[in-house]
Image: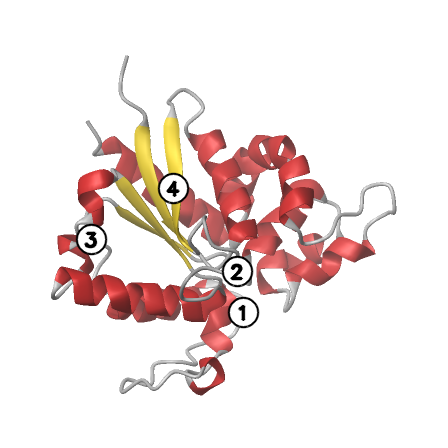
């Protein structure tokens, strides 16, 4: 019996973890795994360096300082087989000043017209890689950039007939705003508890999401490629 796959996650917040864990469960249905959230830290209510995209930025800078030059040399890979780096596409509309960050390279905002989602996510991925000192995703590392947010995957998974899903949820400005618009009996809030309660549905919907949503498809493809290189 093979050892469980050790997966590390750097994400904007705890709800992102629930969604990505459901995606992993759908992808790794025949393989055991252990998911460890490095950012925000699981043992702290808001993480030592905060949550959101600013927390991801700070984690990346700490990793860069720890590794010396680039993420691929970080000691975290000694304890984990795979690293997932998540950043919602709406971060492409942000500025460093909005996050209280003094940054020499002003590569935010970097958003483009949507559709296609890739007009923003391709640029955002380059920004994220610069934060960790890499020109391309290093080995055993998968980027995840849901458009416009991870909540788009939740809405598309649970409410496929929703207006925003039909019109193109990946270009909907605030996907989470669709959650309270659902019928009362099905309505959920953007909370860890609500997402966890629908975790099985999120998992079962993953094959459909990876066929119909551009960024879900990219994450699925790149994760499968990374898994194919695992022993």
Q: Where is 120 relative to 106, above or below?
A: above
Identify the residue position indicated by label 2 in the image. 147
Q: Earlier in the sequence, mark 1 or mark 3?
A: 1
Identify the residue position indicated by label 3 in the image. 138
Q: Secondary structure at mark 3?
A: loop
Q: Please tell me whether mark 3 or mark 2 is closer to you in this view.
A: 3
Mark 1 and 3 residues: CB-CB less than 8 Å, in contact? no
What mark, if any, has residue 114 been given in the picture?
1
Instruction: Name the quadrant of the N terminus.
Output: top left
Q: Earlier in the sequence, mark 1 or mark 4?
A: 4
Render colour scheme: secondary structure
Q: As drawn, which residue projects farthest toward the right? A: 184
The quarter of the displayed image where residue 33 is located: top left
Identify the residue position indicated by label 4 in the image. 36
Indicate left or right for 112 with 162 as reference. Answer: left
Q: Nearer the viewer, residue 152 or 133?
A: 133
Mark 1 and 4 residues: CB-CB less than 8 Å, in contact? no
Residue appearing at x 17%, y 54% in the figure: 74
Indicate left or right for 227 with 154 as reference. Answer: left
């Amino acid at each position: 019996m093979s050892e469980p796959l050790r997966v590390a996650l750097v994400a904007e917040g705890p709800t992102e973890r629930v969604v990505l864990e459901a995606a992993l469960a759908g992808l790794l249905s025949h393989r055991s795994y252990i998911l460890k959230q490095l950012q925000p830290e699981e043992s702290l209510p808001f993480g030592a360096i905060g949550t959101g995209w600013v927390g991801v930025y700070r984690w990346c800078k700490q990793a860069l300082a720890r590794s010396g030059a680039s993420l691929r040399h970080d000691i975290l890979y000694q304890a984990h087989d795979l690293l997932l780096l998540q950043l919602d596409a709406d971060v492409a509309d942000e500025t460093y000043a909005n996050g209280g960050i003094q940054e020499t390279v002003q590569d935010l905002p970097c958003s483009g017209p949507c559709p296609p989602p890739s007009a923003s996510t391709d640029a955002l991925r380059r920004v994220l890689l610069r934060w960790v000192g890499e020109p391309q995703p290093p080995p055993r590392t998968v980027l995840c950039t849901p458009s416009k947010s991870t909540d788009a995957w939740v809405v598309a998974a649970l409410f496929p007939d929703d207006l925003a899903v039909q019109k193109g949820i990946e270009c909907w400005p605030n996907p989470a705003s669709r959650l309270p618009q659902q019928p009362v009996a099905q309505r959920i809030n953007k909370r860890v508890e609500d997402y966890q309660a629908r975790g099985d549905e999120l998992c079962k919907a993953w094959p459909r999401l990876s066929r119909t949503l551009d960024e879900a498809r990219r994450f699925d493809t790149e994760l499968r490629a990374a898994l194919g290189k695992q022993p």
